[in-house]
Amino acid sequence: MFDLNGKVAVVTGGSRGIGRATAQALAAQGAHVVVGYGSNEAAARQTAQAIEAAGGKAEILGFDVADTAAGEKAVAEVAKRLGRLDVLVASAGISLDGLLLRLKDEDFDRTFAVNVKGAIACTRGALKSMMRARAGRVIFLSSVVGEMGNAGQTAYAASKAALLGVTRSLAREYASRGITVNAVTPGYIETDMTGALTDEQRQAMLAGVPLARAGQPADVAACIAFLASDEAGYITGQALRINGGMYM
């Protein structure tokens, strides 16, 4: 099951956290994975090397997802160079937190530039190839915060909620071409982003998780690998919650 042999996948934000785990999971199922990164080339190479050490196929590709022209071009050129593009996972994201009265306009704009506009631009770059093939998988990395909100994360929550609207709209636009578009909404996952939390903040987060533990990047990656597979061919326009029961 979940056989991705012969398929090509692009994972933005693939140098760390959920993106890295996703790149490894897709490669483990046989996909040739292009690990997208913004600035940390060394970390992206580590991801690719880990994939290759496990017998998989990977390469790295650097571009700034906030530069929409660059993002669209980079993804489109992958499809042209490799002859196909079957899976796009838009995992790159940032969180610039702060109470609304202290939130700067430039922080809000940067959050949307990366989390929303960047994801849309990369999708635009993937769609022509997928439309010609009449098949494809687009998967956005949203967040439980986009569903339930969180104090001090207005910009982040708004950007992740926006991706859910993008998911449903694109699912309707491209279903007739055999392309599915879905999102995942992780809860409290142990990554670099959540590593900055204090012990008090961690305990407060865990108090709201019925499974009483933090998730791991591999938990999210496994669900993304499923959505990328042929077995998920009748699923589109959905947001798969991976949150330990934090939000139901």
Image (cartoon, helix red, strand yellow):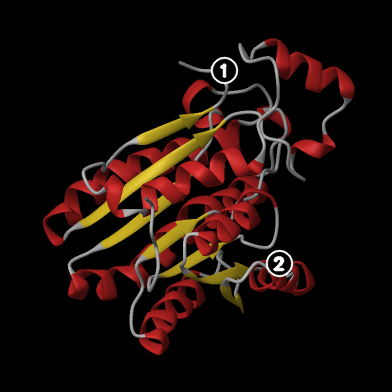
Specify the quadrant of the image occupied by residue 214.
top right
Residue that numbered label 2 is attached to: 50
- Point out residue 217 in the picture as x, y percentages from the top left corner: 64, 43
Q: Quadrant of the C terminus?
A: top left
Residue at far right of view: 199
Locate residue 192 relative to residue 72 in the image: left or right: right
> Could you say which is closer to the camera, residue 106 or residue 203?
203
Locate residue 119 relative to residue 149 in the image: left or right: left
Dot placed on the residue nearer the N-terminal end, 2 or 1: 2
Rendered view: 50 above or below 228: below
- Secondary element under disc 2, as helix, strand or loop, is helix
Q: Amino acid at mark 2?
A: Ala
> Could you say which is closer to the camera, residue 225 or residue 112?
225
Residue sitting at 71 percent across and 27 percent down?
A: 99
Residue that numbered label 1 is attached to: 246
- Mark 1 closeness class: few <14, some 14–19, many ≥20 residues within 10 Å: many
Residue 226: mark in rendering: none
Q: Amino acid at mark 1?
A: Met
Residue sitting at 50 percent across and 31 percent down?
A: 146
Residue at far bottom of view: 81
Rendered view: 109 above or below 147: below
How many numbered discs, if any? 2
Locate residue 212 relative to residue 89 in the image: left or right: right
Question: Mark 2 or mark 1, which is nearer to you?
Answer: 2
